[in-house]
Each structure stands twice: as C-alpha cells, then as structure tokens.
Image (cartoon, rainbow, N blue to C red):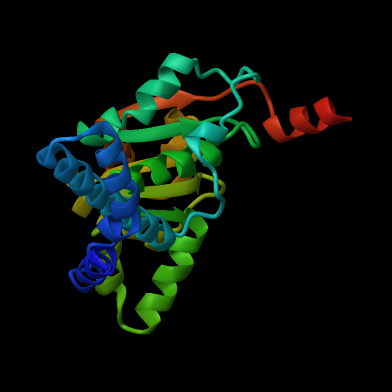
Amino acid sequence: MIADQVRLLAHQLRLFGFHANFERRAAEALSAQMHPLDFLKLMLDDECLFRKERVAKALATRAGFRSPAMLEDWDTTFDRGIPKARLTELASLGFFFNKENLLLLGKTGEGKTHLAVALGRRLCAEGAQTTFMPVNLLFEEVAAARAAGGYLKLLKKLNKSKALILDDFGLRAYTHEEATVLVDLLEDRYRNGVVIVTSQVDPRGWQKLFEDAVIAEAIVDRLKHPAQRVVLKGGSYRERLANARS
C-alpha cells in the first residue's frame, strides 16, 4: 500500500513529524479538497513542530530543573505583586532577546524559583540552552571540578548555556574563592548570555555578601547592568495555599 511506502520513506529520512501525521493530514486534504502545495506546507509545519518540541524536551532534560513548573501553572488568584500583563511580558522573553539579566526577588515561598524554572522551560521551548543551578550546588561542582583538574572545562560548559539560572543567591556570605568563581563565570557571560537570579536579598545588600569590596562591585555590576527586576510579595504562597485548603 502507498501508505506503507510513505511511512517507510518518512522513517528512513527521519521525518518523524511527517511519519506521525501524514495519514491524518491526507484525510483532511481530501475532505477539504486542498491544493497539493497547501497539503505539503501542513506536512512541513508538522515536521518543524515535531523537531522543535523534541529539541525543547532535550534542552529541558539537560537543564537540571528541580520542578516541573510551567508559566501556565502560575496561580493568578493569589496576589504576589506581579500583574498578568507583567507575567505576559516575561513570557515573551524580551529580557532574553535584549540580553538583560533577570532578578527575581522576594521572601521564601513567594514563587521565585517557580517563576525562574517556568521561564527556563519557556526558553528551552524556544531552543535556548538553559542551565538551572542552585548557587551552593555550583560551588560544590566547582570544588569537584578543581579536584579533578576540570575547572575551566566546567566554566566552558556552563557558559555554553544562553541562560544560566542561579537559584537562592545570597543565602549566606561567600568566601574569596567563591567570589572569584562568580567573577570568572559572569565575566565570560557578560553580553553573551543572560543570568536569571533568584534571591531573598535586595540587590542593595549584595555587596555585603563578599569580603573583597572590589570583587563584590564587579559581581554586582555584572548582575545588575543591564537587568530587569521582579519583586514578589504577599508572603509564602505554599502557606497561603495550605491555609486555603484547610
């Protein structure tokens, strides 16, 4: 049968989107008396969408997200200080395309990490390689890499990502060695990729996290300029949700 031949050829050519949809699309084309070129365009659209979704899935797997959070999951019935218009603006990824960092600020439980992960997944859907990294884990990986002689290799790997999410920045003060790591990382990324930072600490207090004022200024400057800010408020969403259910 012709359908079997098409199926085999599509598989051999690795046209998996075509392979999955051609019979349904052929039936639609016959029903609508579609022009052959319109039918062909539909099939090519299916193939493009399949490939985009496959890339997005692979990028999201490699990103290391610690939750399945999506922007569609953001509960707008709770006021967390971010209007729907602002959420829509963030979803358009303007900060990324303008090469601006994104600072997500607020107290514990207000949704900083959820928003960071959701935006990271949106970036993956657009084909942008993304890495999610809690700051304390970053330094653990650096220590392991240095012990194995692979520090520069780790930096290179991290900076392949067009978006680097540093989660829970400022939970503690940082040593001189850790500050140097941040300088190395941010220096290579400056204007080449964006950083999304989640922090409970207002950026005006970031310099106090470092021993060396000169290094502190370099780190803070590279994070803040240029950058957009989102300040969440309203208290712990998890606590409010638990109260609402009780």
Nearest the viewer among 198 and 130 is: 130
Nearest the viewer among 205 and 157 is: 157
Please tell me whether residue 208 is drawn above or below residue 147 in the rendered image.
above
Q: Which residue is the extreme one toward the front?
A: 1
Whole-percent x and y of residue 184? 26, 58
Q: In which quarter of the image is the C terminus?
A: top right
Nearest the viewer among 170 and 243 is: 243
Whole-percent x and y of residue 29? 25, 40
Q: In which quarter of the image is the N terminus?
A: bottom left
68 relative position to 195: left or right = right
Point 46% across, 59% down: residue: 64
Point 43% across, 49% down: residue: 166
Classify residue 126 by image quadrant. Answer: top left
Please tell me whether residue 18 is drawn above or below residue 74 in the rendered image.
below
Q: Which residue is the extreme one toward the right?
A: 246
Point 45% across, 58% down: residue: 175
Please tell me whether residue 154 is drawn above or below residue 126 in the rendered image.
below
